[in-house]
Amino acid sequence: MKPIELEKVQEKLEGFINKDVYVHLETTNGAYASHVNEKAYNVGVYIRNAKVRFNQAKIVGDGKSYRAGLKMDIGWIYAEGLTDWEIFEGEKLLMAGHDREGRLMVALQISETPFSY
């Protein structure tokens, strides 16, 4: 993966607008939190192959960390803390956020075809 390039990622996001796409979204502080602090709550989200259609997409950030939002007719999908990106399997967009030690904290993937499971 490479650091997010705002213009390139925005262009790729816009290529998915008004199409049926599959979304993978996950967040975690999971095992990382409890190893550092016994009293920390483990939290996380995992959704794979949610079929959605969005009419607006935007990525913004300060050059260190980014947030991406996908606006649908009746709601939003939102991921914050993104740091890296890549295109894989030809057309699938992967954005991820890693902590200072390189551990995954958030991932948002978008594809016109379902993700393997």
Image (tube, rainbow, N blue to C red):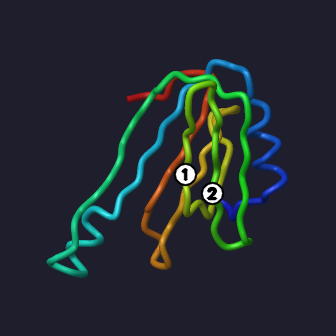
Say whether residue 20 is left or right of residue 97. right
Q: Mark 2, residues whose alpha carbon is within 10 Å: few (<14), some, or many (≥20)? A: some
What residue appears at the point 50 percent right and 51 percent down from the top-left corner? 107
103 lies above or below 9: below
Of callouts 2 and 1, the N-terminal one: 2
What residue appears at the point 41 percent right and 53 percent down from the top-left corner? 27
Which residue is nearer to you in this view: 21 or 1?
A: 21
Dot 2 and dot 1 residues touching (CB under 8 Å): yes
Say whether residue 27 is left or right of residue 91. left
Q: What element carries label 1?
A: strand
Which residue is nearer to you in this view: 66 or 107?
A: 66
Residue 17 location in percent, x, y?
74, 28
What residue sits right under mark 1 in the picture?
A: 79
Q: Mark 1, residues whose alpha carbon is within 10 Å: few (<14), some, or many (≥20)? A: many
Specify the quadrant that holds the N terminus.
bottom right
What residue sits right under mark 2 in the picture?
A: 67
Which residue is nearer to you in this view: 92 or 63?
A: 63
Residue 57 location in percent, x, y?
72, 40
Residue 63 location in percent, x, y?
73, 71
What residue appears at the point 72 percent right and 52 percent down from the top-left corner? 59
Mark linked to residue 8: none
Specify the quadrant that holds the C terminus.
top left
Q: Distance between the residues labelled 2 and 1?
A: 6 Å
Q: Which residue lies furthest to the top in this view?
A: 20
Residue 20 location in percent, x, y?
63, 18
47 lies above or below 32: above
What residue appears at the point 47 percent right and 56 percent down from the top-left corner? 106
**Amino acid type, mark 1:** Ala
The quadrant where residue 76 appears:
top right
Say whether residue 51 is left or right of residue 9. left
The quadrant where residue 83 appears:
bottom right
84 lies above or below 74: below
